Each structure stands twice: as C-alpha cells, then as structure tokens.
Amino acid sequence: MGGSYLRWRLGVADESSCELFMALLGEVGFEAFETMPMNQEGVGVSAGHPKQDIPSPFVMEAYGLVETVGPLFQDRWLGENQDKILWIDGPHSMPNTNWNAEWESNFEPVRLGKSLGLRAPFHEPMGDMALELVMMPRMSFGTGHHETTLLMSWWLLGAPTEQTIQIGQKVLWEPGPLRVDTVEGLPLHQNPKQDAPFSRLKGFRVLDMGCGTGILGILAARLGASSVIGIDVEAWSAENAAENAIRNAVPAQGSHTEWLCGDAELLPSLWAVHGKFDLILANINRNILLTDMAAYDGSLQPGGQLWLSGFYTEDHGVLLQEAKRLGLVCVGSAALNKWSTLLFEKEKV
C-alpha cells in the first residue's frame, strides 16, 4: 500500500477513547493508527493548548491517504467531533509508506502460558502450544495483544492458573490475570457442559458481539461450540472474521458459524431463527455495553452467561447496577493492567 499520506495528532483523554476514535476514523478512510501516553515535553500540543490544562491525555496519531481523508476529515468529521478531542495538531504530510510492511515489523506473537498461542500467518508455528490461532487483522480490532482480548481468551480457556502472558519477548503479566471468584458474595459457577479442555463449549450456541477479527468466536468454535455467530458494525471486520475462521479450520464438521455486519438490533431476528444463546461475548466499550445489555439479556437462554469486557475496573459500578436491574447475577471478574471483565449468569426459570 503506497501513496501520499497525511498524519494527524489528536489529544485524547484515555485509552478507551482512543479505541473509539480508531473505529470512527476508520469509517472515514484512515488506515493506520498509533497511540501513546503524552511525554513530559508535551509533544503534539498545538499553540493555545498548554499541557497543564489537559487531564492525563494520550496522543493518537492517525494516518490516511491525502485524497481520502483530507477534505472529508477537515470539513465533516472534525467539525462534528471537535468537542470530544482535547487538542488537534495537523495535518502533516508523510512520505510514501508501505503500511503492511510497517505493521508486520511491529506485530509479535502472543503466548498465554502453554495454553494458547496467537500469531500472524507470516510467523513461524508455535509447536509448544496446546492450541494455536493464526490471525490476520487487516483493519479490525482483536489481534490478541490488548488486555481485554487476552482476558476473554483466558476465560474461554477455563481461567487456567499461573499462565504467564507474553508478547514477543516481553512478559506482560507473570502469574496471569488477577481473578476474583466472588463478586457481591456470589461464587463463580462452573458450567456443567464444561468437561475436557478442548470440548469446554461442546453444544454451546455462542454470540461474539463486536467480533473484530473473530478471534473470540473462532476460539469458542475450536473449543467445541456447535454454533458461533459474530457481529460487528464494520463490514470489513465481518469479512476479516470470516477469512480468519477459514484460516483456522472453522467451522468444524457439524458446527455452524456466521459473521454479520450490524449491531444489537439484529439479535431478535437471529435468536428467532437459531434459538437463544448459551454464551454471549461482548468485548466492546462501556457505553455500548450499557446501551445493549438489555438486548443481550433478551438473547440469552435461562442459565446462559454474558461475559463483558472493554472497560476499566473503575467502571464496574454502573455495569453491575444495570445488570442487577435486568436480573443478571455476577459470577466472576478478572483484571489485567486496569482492564477488566465481568461474567454474568441469567437466572434459570
């Protein structure tokens, strides 16, 4: 991929907002992103925006072709969303760049103990892993590098203890995620369908909301799920997930997978045809989770589970409150570097 590119720097309040802006900017043609905490010198702060007035910002750099993002970004998107950004610096002209080569040079394999290896097609196979997934992310979220994806994958594997998480040569978390088996006094229930490690989800109907690359749905299928439906608001993510499913020999014989572009509005028509779900995975962000939790609850079988991620531990309060209103029982949580998961169960009739 070549051409003349523009680079914009945006001051963003937190990592969660960075992820939201990446999704939004992808819609208007940006092709590559980089996020980092702002350094002590305040690099990127434009005139009139002194560093001391900006609360703990991150810098997000966004890159796109001149003919795609120049006029559209400035005249439309920026005007509509300027109030959400702490400061703006750009555009800056960039030389021709091969983004695929740039991305590949920075993509490192991920290891979750000896239980799961995640790599790209251009990496060598991991012969010492119990299970290996090969993911090509294109522009989709879910390479396995982010804490939220790692946490959800870890839960799907049965929350194995003492699992060192490693990205390339860097150890991210020596003993594995911090697990809490009791939330509001409620123990973590083990699903009776979970038996051998690679048939933990045997017979399960699984929904992967905000599927991105399809990594969680594909892992669920490899763990024995009889049906996996993945949904993402971006058409390219649904296409990317379908490609990655084939790359990982999913679906297996006798199972069903489907990757759709859409949102929670699709759910009633889906469970009307396929039946309600045994397990719903939603790794998105706090605001969407709050908005759509009632739709997830309505799509669950009695006794089914809803697993949420994409938020910080400090967000537990509002999520627990909404779940309690719906009658969902919290049965577990785990955290990794401030990012968190909450697991809920729908009460049996």
Image (cartoon, helix red, strand yellow):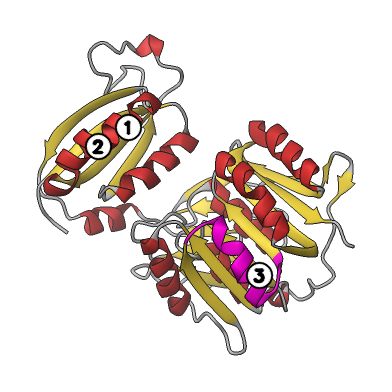
Residue 41 horizontal/vertical position (percent): 31, 17
The mark that comes first in sequence, 3 or 1, is 1
| Above/below status of 140 relative to 332 | below
Helix, strand or loop status at disc 3: helix
Quadrant of the drawing holding the C terminus: bottom right
Q: Which amino acid type is shown beneath numbered disc 2?
A: Arg
Residue 72 horizontal/vertical position (percent): 20, 41
Q: Is the magenta stretch mostly helix, strand or loop?
A: helix
Quadrant of the drawing holding the N terminus: bottom left
The answer to whether marks 2 and 1 mark residues whose Cβ atoms lie closer than 8 Å is yes
- Which range is magenta? 262-278
User: What's the distance in space between the residues labelled 2 and 1, CA to CA?
Assistant: 6 Å
The answer to whether marks 3 and 1 mark residues whose Cβ atoms lie closer than 8 Å is no
At 88% from the left edge and 46% from the top edge, which residue is drawn?
186
Residue closest to the eye, 116 or 94: 94
Q: Can residue 143 be seen in this view?
A: yes
Say which mark, if any, is on residue 271: 3
Q: Which amino acid type is shown beneath numbered disc 3?
A: Trp
Say which mark, if any, is on residue 266: none
Callout 2 crowding tier (Cα within 10 Å): few <14, some 14–19, many ≥20: few
Helix, strand or loop status at disc 2: helix
At 17% from the left edge and 55% from the top edge, which residue is drawn?
98
Residue designated by label 2: 76
The mark that comes first in sequence, 3 or 2, is 2
Q: Which amino acid type is shown beneath numbered disc 1?
A: Glu
| Above/below status of 199 relative to 21 | below
| Above/below status of 71 relative to 47 | below
Q: Does the magenta stretch include residue 274?
A: yes
Residue designated by label 1: 80
User: What's the distance in space between the residues labelled 3 and 1, CA to CA?
Assistant: 36 Å
Residue 275 horizontal/vertical position (percent): 70, 74
